[in-house]
Image (cartoon, rainbow, N blue to C red):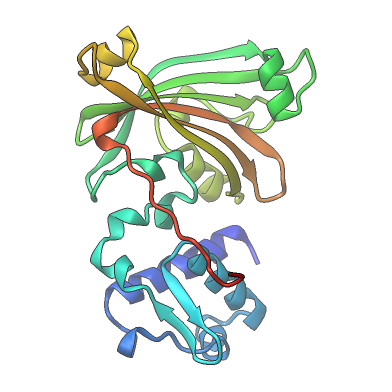
Amino acid sequence: MTNLAHKNISHNLKLRILDGEFTNNKLPNEQKLAQNYKVSRSTIKNILNVLAQQGIIFKKRGAGSFVNPLYIRNQSLFQSKENNLDITDNLNISGQKMSSRLITYNIIVATAELQQNLFLAKTEHVYEIKRVRLLDEKAIAIETVYIPVKTIPELSPTIAKGSIFKFLEDTLDTSVSKAFLSIMADSSTFEDQKLLGLSNVEPVGITEGLFFLDDGTPLGLFKMRTNYKYLRYDTFVSMDNT
């Protein structure tokens, strides 16, 4: 089953959840869902596992799968429903329109740090892309992205202005499945203050992420400096083994 088909079923289930289709917030069992979508039961099981990891549903042993009421009440906490581990998942955007403005687009020889993080040889090249992330046309974050050229040879400036993750899913039929994220704070630089409208005493939130494609290939290193007013971090903790 292709990643695109997997994504379409997952997206349709989320729409049905938001439409209040499921009585008492209980989803049909795996067999019924498999029949409904004309796929294998194992495929449905995998999709439900992903939705559970995202916190959109939860499973009760012996009772089935249920919608997380928080998902219906506050969808802005669940940005991964559209962008699949996008680094903007950590931004408090509350359903507003997110867009990007491209500042620089370069192809450079990978530094020693990038060689180590992305498993590259000394002579290999990476895209160095800097974007301002906009919320309803207001600059709220500066993002710098390093992606090996060999991983996405088609990555043009036009594509870089939009969602790179969405391009992977829609065009290349692959997706980001894992990430290692670090979230911290720092004093704002002159560039932060100029682009994000901060004073010289206001901080920024920093999110750095190493992202991996579903076949284990490192996609790239993403670094984002965010206006502290828009940074929030939400997570789900499994207590199954406690």
How many callouts does the rendering have?
A: 0
Q: Residue at x 63, y 62 (%)?
A: 2
Q: Quadrant of residue 241?
A: bottom right
Q: Quadrant of residue 91?
A: top left
Q: Is residue 204 above or below residue 104?
A: below
Q: Residue at x 28, y 30 (%)?
A: 228
Q: Residue at x 71, y 40 (%)?
A: 217
Q: Quadrant of residue 46?
A: bottom right
Q: Residue at x 49, y 67 (%)?
A: 51
Image position of 206 (left or right of 106): left
Image position of 173 (left or right of 95): right
The quadrant in which the N terminus is found is: bottom right
Residue 239: x %, y % from top left = 53, 68
Identify which residue, 33 or 91, lies in the foreground. 91
User: Which residue occupies the extreme top position in the image?
Assistant: 190
User: Which residue occupies the extreme right position in the image?
Assistant: 121
The quadrant in which the C terminus is found is: bottom right
